[in-house]
């Protein structure tokens, strides 16, 4: 794929970086801004710098991209690299107003300022006579692209902090009092974001040429508006009594204390507007391999440079980082094996007939007992005993597999496209062996996904990530691949629509069913309703929340979803588990003694390892308190601004 000229501006614009806050603009920077807007070419670089905010790995978090660690800070996975990074602080509760590695207050307000400066100045750029024909319309579009980004930055702050200062214009810092902005209410913040997105959408096209792929379209504005309104309608923001104490010094209530059902209707209509726009713009729920439900889903992520489903792609170039971080750390695979998928994520996948394997509570959470074991749903036919042999897709072809646990039999095709597990294959063209997550003595270290000698480097739950991995590359030969990250894709909007209508209506109707079934039908999962419970609002709430969890796995939604639904104390404040992939030697010796097997004989040692592997094993107890639903405003900001009040509980 040839380089995209417009995106090259992002790289060039790095030279223009500064570290100033929104309200703290140095005179030297003002001077440089005057120079920037003296010429359209340098102004384009300034816009490129704003685009670059989507891609920069600032600190430990790439906000909405491959390198984000949000999935490892919730019940999707565990980042087992042994470094004192954000996921360890979050999962242990050891973070706060002076130590929040995922907080982006300063970064986002920096770019709010950049976008505002651009919006205020781009119309003032004098075009040369030879530039007028080409740039007169493009300058108008540039302005609306920057407007989208400012709204995006405010949304990012809103989902992290709730009520936030809302500088709509560039602040005059000649009087320090001008910099003491109080927090605006979440209602004001959301209304402003949506109004700005309406303006931007009206001035932007539906699409661009291939050479300008990645630029902001009308659809991106509509999609961000729909996501914003969905968040606002959710329990965290909509009538949350826990935030009754969030009142500014002037008496402004920052979080509405009355529940407003109409917010769900507004969110539903916004999501439907995206769906309607998509039909006109050629955006579809793509089916790149409809004859194979597993690959039909998998290709949306590993072969998506021309995807018709992505509303706004994040263009990260050609490399192999994501494949390296997801691929097994075993020597013959050549990956880094950064993430271990949690058993709780595996438990979320339905059976192929569309039943939940386990019983769920009204919030859509699997019910676990004190020992971490779920109660099986008898309607599902699911079992955790016994083994089977048959055919599974290995990423390139159907492959015969042996002795696969019945836990992994007849599940949602997205399970096989997203998760790697004991006994399955991956990329048989290069590595012709099953994946070995179970541990046994006398096993070659080069062919072992859960190498006990590499604790902290290899898989610790018995499950690896397959989603995003390209089966057509060989990491040991440094083959590279190209992925686009879907900052917004159409499937999310169908799920947004289904959720919002279900919460607005007393009982689900076809608006709910048709939206969620559009997503399910792509992978061959039966249409809803299936059970009598599916015909109720609570029953469909379970379905929709679980559908988001499965469809949007490792796309940085779950972290915020469990917060806006206010179920994070159950989800992120509980034990997380995996299979028993790291048994102690005493356990292996006891199992060998009971079975009469010899651990010094490799084939018999393998049997012993497998005999202790298939049981749920506690990995860690995570910590989540009420105050964790929103990030604390940085203490440095509280110290500087007398009008800022701290978030609840901090």
Image (cartoon, rainbow, N blue to C red):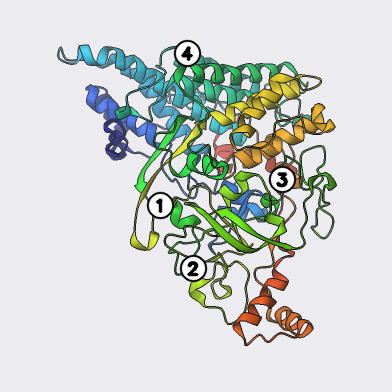
Mark 3 or 2, nearer chain start: 2
What is the spatial separation of the Cα atoms under label 4 and label 3, in whole angstroms?
45 Å
Q: What element does badge 1 sit on?
A: loop
Mark 4 or 3, nearer chain start: 4
Mark 4 or 1, nearer chain start: 4
Residue 214: x and y in percent read 38, 30
Q: Are marks 4 and 3 in contact (CB under 8 Å)?
A: no
Which tag is nearer the camera, tag 3 or tag 2? Answer: 3
Q: What element does badge 3 sit on?
A: loop
Q: Can you tell which quarter of the image residue 339 is in?
A: bottom right
What is the spatial separation of the Cα atoms under label 2 and label 4, in whole angstroms?
52 Å
What is the spatial separation of the Cα atoms under label 1 and label 3, in whole angstroms?
29 Å
Q: Are marks 2 and 4 in contact (CB under 8 Å)?
A: no
Mark 2 or 1, nearer chain start: 2
Residue 9: x and y in percent read 28, 33
Residue 432: x and y in percent read 47, 65
How many numbered marks, from 0 up? Answer: 4
User: Are there few (<14), some (14-19), or many (20+) residues within 10 Å of tag 2?
Assistant: many
Residue 347 visible in rendering: yes
Mark 2 or 4, nearer chain start: 4
Q: What element does badge 4 sit on?
A: helix
- The quadrant the C terminus occupies is top right
Residue 86 left/right relative to 497: left
* Numbered badge on residue 351: 3
Circle 4 is placed at which residue position?
199
Say which of 226 and 373 sits in front. Answer: 373
Residue 452 left/right relative to 487: right
- The quadrant the N terminus occupies is top left
Q: Kindly identify the residue that appears in the image at 54 percent across and 20 percent down.
A: 274
Which tag is nearer the camera, tag 2 or tag 4? Answer: 2
């Amino acid at each position: 794929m040839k380089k995209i000229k417009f995106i090259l501006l992002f790289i060039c614009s790095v030279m223009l970086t500064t570290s100033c806050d929104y309200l703290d603009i140095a005179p030297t920077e003002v001077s440089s801004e005057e120079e920037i807007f003296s010429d359209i070419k340098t102004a384009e670089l300034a816009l490129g710098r704003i685009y670059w905010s989507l891609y920069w790995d600032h600190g430990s978090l790439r906000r909405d991209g491959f390198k984000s660690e949000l999935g490892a800070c919730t019940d999707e996975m565990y980042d087992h690299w042994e470094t004192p990074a954000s996921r360890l602080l979050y999962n242990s509760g050891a973070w706060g107003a002076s130590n929040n590695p995922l907080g982006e207050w300063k970064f986002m307000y920096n770019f709010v300022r950049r976008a505002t400066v651009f919006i205020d100045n781009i119309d003032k750029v004098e075009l040369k006579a030879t530039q007028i024909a080409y740039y007169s319309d493009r300058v108008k579009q540039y302005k609306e692209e920057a407007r989208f980004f400012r709204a995006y930055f405010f949304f990012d702050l809103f989902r992290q902090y709730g009520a936030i200062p809302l500088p709509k214009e560039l602040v005059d810092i000649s009087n320090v009092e001008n910099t003491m902005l109080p927090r605006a209410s979440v209602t004001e913040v959301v209304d402003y974001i949506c109004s700005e997105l309406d303006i931007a959408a009206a001035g932007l096209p539906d699409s661009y040429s291939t050479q300008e792929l990645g630029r902001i379209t009308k659809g991106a504005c509509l999609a961000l508006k729909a996501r914003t309104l969905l968040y606002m309608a959710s329990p965290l923001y909509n009538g949350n009594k826990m935030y009754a104490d969030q009142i500014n010094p002037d008496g402004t209530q920052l979080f509405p204390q009355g529940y407003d059902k109409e917010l769900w209707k507004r969110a539903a209509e916004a999501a439907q507007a995206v769906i309607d726009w998509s039909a006109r713009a050629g955006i579809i729920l793509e089916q790149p391999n409809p004859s194979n439900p597993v690959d039909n889903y998998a290709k949306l992520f590993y072969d998506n440079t021309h995807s018709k489903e992505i509303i706004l792609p994040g263009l990260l170039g050609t490399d192999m980082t994501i494949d390296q971080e997801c691929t097994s750390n075993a020597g013959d695979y050549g990956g880094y094996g950064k993430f271990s998928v949690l058993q709780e994520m595996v438990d979320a996948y339905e059976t192929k007939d569309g039943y939940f394997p386990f019983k769920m509570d009204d919030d859509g959470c699997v019910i676990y007992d004190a020992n971490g074991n779920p109660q099986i749903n008898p309607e599902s036919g699911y079992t955790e005993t016994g083994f089977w042999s048959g055919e599974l897709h290995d990423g390139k072809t159907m492959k015969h597999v042996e002795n696969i646990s019945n836990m992994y039999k007849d599940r949602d095709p997205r399970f096989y496209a997203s998760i790697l597990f004991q006994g399955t294959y991956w990329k048989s063209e290069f590595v012709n062996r099953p994946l070995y997550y179970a541990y046994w003595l006398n096993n070659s270290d080069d062919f072992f996904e859960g190498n006990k000698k590499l604790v902290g480097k290899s898989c610790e739950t018995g499950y690896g990530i397959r989603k995003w991995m390209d089966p057509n590359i060989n990491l040991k030969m440094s083959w590279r691949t190209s992925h686009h990250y879907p900052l917004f894709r159409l499937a999310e909007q169908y799920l947004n629509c289904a959720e919002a209508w279900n919460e607005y209506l007393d009982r689900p109707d076809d608006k709910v069913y048709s939206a969620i079934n559009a997503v399910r039908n792509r992978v061959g999962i039966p249409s809803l309703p299936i059970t009598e419970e599916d015909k109720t609002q609570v029953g469909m709430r379970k379905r929709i929340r679980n559908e988001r969890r499965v469809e949007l796995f490792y796309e940085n939604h779950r972290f915020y979803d469990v917060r806006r639904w206010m179920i994070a104390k159950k989800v992120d404040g509980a034990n997380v588990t995996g299979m028993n992939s790291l048994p102690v030697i005493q356990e292996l010796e006891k199992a060998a003694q009971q079975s009469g097997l010899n651990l010094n004989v490799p084939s018999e040692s393998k049997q012993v390892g497998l005999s202790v592997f298939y049981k749920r094993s506690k990995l860690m107890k995570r910590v989540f308190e009420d105050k964790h639903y929103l990030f604390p405003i940085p203490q440095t900001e509280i110290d500087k601004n007398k009008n800022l009040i701290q978030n609840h509980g901090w």
